[in-house]
Image (cartoon, rainbow, N blue to C red):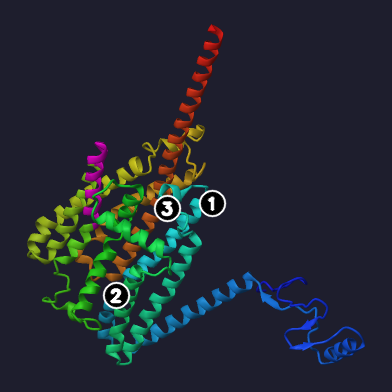
Amino acid sequence: MFGGFTVQPGNSPHLRKTSSRPTFADLGVDVEEGPMHSMVGDQFKSLNMPSINATPFVPSPTFLWRFKVILFFLWGFICCKVSWDSVMRMSVDLRDLFLYEAFLYYNPLLLVTGMVWLWGINLWVFLQANVNYDKIFDLDQNHLTHREIWKCATWMTIVVPSSMTAYLYLYSHGEVSLAASQPVLLYMAVGMLLIFPFDIFYLSSRYFLLRTLWRIILPLQAISFCDFFLADVLTSMSKVFSDLERSVCRMVNRQVATIAWFEADSICGSHSIAIPIVLVLPYLFRLFQCLRQHKDTGEQTTLLNALKYSTAVPVIFLSALKYHVIEENWRSFYRPLWLFSGVVNSLYSYYWDVTRDWDLSCFTRIFKFSRPSLLSSLLYRQKWVYLWVLGSNLILRCTWTYKLSAHLRHNYLTVFTIAALEIFRRFQWAFFRVENEWNKMNSKLNIQLSQIETGNEEDKLLGANDHHNV
């Protein structure tokens, strides 16, 4: 049922031998061949001891994998059971408030964990489709494969919910100080792991990520595909960064395991000006990248792309005005203006996804399957995939406004769901964005090869003419 066992061959190095005398290595007994050897062997057989030719049993990989899966689900059941019992111990009035606070600390890391899982799926699909993604992203030979990405995601899936379970259990049993230390220790561990300077935990990949983030923050050099690809991913994680800022703010001000943020004067509450600033930063980084690309290339499309990211700024700050203007002004003027700016940004972004990032050429590529030059090398002849991504991307783009809405901050389950859907939208966006870049690289390569072949043919013709003239 679990894959069985494998048997070592007779010439396995696990069976140690001498030149002329067989050795019972596991028993520490040396027996020479002859009558005595036969007698001792019979005694071992009567005692049901393993003979000299017995080989150790090694669990098969299938058995080990299934055993790990069973342990994983057992751990998940224990976490759910302990968390549920801990929440039920609290009073009804305290339960919702405390869950809201606990959710603040852990939902950013849960969303990041989900994105890591999805990125592993991206790499696996690229590998199956023979898309050379390491060349596209300019990765070295030590880059992480999808298996290593999934291994990291597995540990993140274990550690983050375990810390949250401990937080709920300790708080419900009156250990408030120990409960408050759980998210603090988790955040410190994540930060230390990223900057850990020793050659463990994928040092080269961690520092590649940090270097790319630094290039995104300060675009003082030519923008590579990896730079703006990761910057686009960060725009989908703006809500994650906002919750991280609020969590760190509460940790610095020692408000963990309290409900102080519901007070109007709380420094880390909904009135904080830091929230819209953090929300808008990924879009500003991407805008500055577009301006840098225009400086380097002079292409006008980079300015249009910068305009797209600039339309996110009014959406974020008009939403934040809800906490700084009177309710009547918000309903009569600012909310309609916020809705209008949200619609403009969503439609502009959708148009850019389809026509620029994916290069679907106004949908014509979907319906011209008789022309191979217009087909996708990644999703060959899968028309329904294109139709699905066009429809779902439009719907998920329209939910972007609500994801960044300041007045929905306390509806944490709704916001978490929309943020998770935005990460899923970015996950499927990555397939077509990388596909488009891969097709461009192949087109350039084909053009260069054709030019080389044309030049060789011209050289041959010139050589033939010279020989004829001579």
**Quadrant hosting residue 320:** bottom left
User: Where residue 214 sits in the image (x, y, percent)?
Assistant: 27, 58
Disc 1 packing (10 Å; few <14; some 14–19; many ≥20): few
Question: What predominant SS class does the magenta segment belong to?
Answer: helix
User: Where residue 315 sits in the image (x, y, percent)?
Assistant: 19, 55
User: Where residue 446 sits in the image (x, y, percent)?
Assistant: 47, 33
Q: Which mark is residue 139?
A: 3
Q: Who comes first in sequence, dot 3 or dot 1?
A: 1
Q: Secondary structure at mark 1?
A: helix
Query: Is 361 placed above or below 94 here?
Result: above
Q: Who comes first in sequence, dot 3 or dot 2?
A: 2
Membership of 51 in magenta stretch? no
Which residue occupies the extreme top position in the image? 469
What segment is highlighted magenta in the picture? 282-302
Q: Going by the image, does 25 lie left or right of 377?
A: right
Q: Which mark is residue 105?
A: 2
**Residue flagged by tag 3: what amino acid is it?**
Leu
Q: Which mark is residue 39?
A: none
Q: Secondary structure at mark 2?
A: helix
Q: Who comes first in sequence, dot 1 or dot 2?
A: 2
Is residue 102 something that shows in the picture?
Answer: yes
Query: Is 225 placed above or below 270 here?
Result: above
Query: Is 374 placed above or below 171 here?
Result: above
Which residue sits at x=63%, y=70%?
62
Of circles 3 and 2, the one toward us is 3
Mark 3 touches mark 1? (CB < 8 Å): no
Disc 2 packing (10 Å; few <14; some 14–19; many ≥20): many
Q: Which residue is mark 1?
A: 128
Membership of 288 in magenta stretch? yes
Q: Secondary structure at mark 3?
A: loop
**Residue flagged by tag 1: what amino acid is it?**
Gln
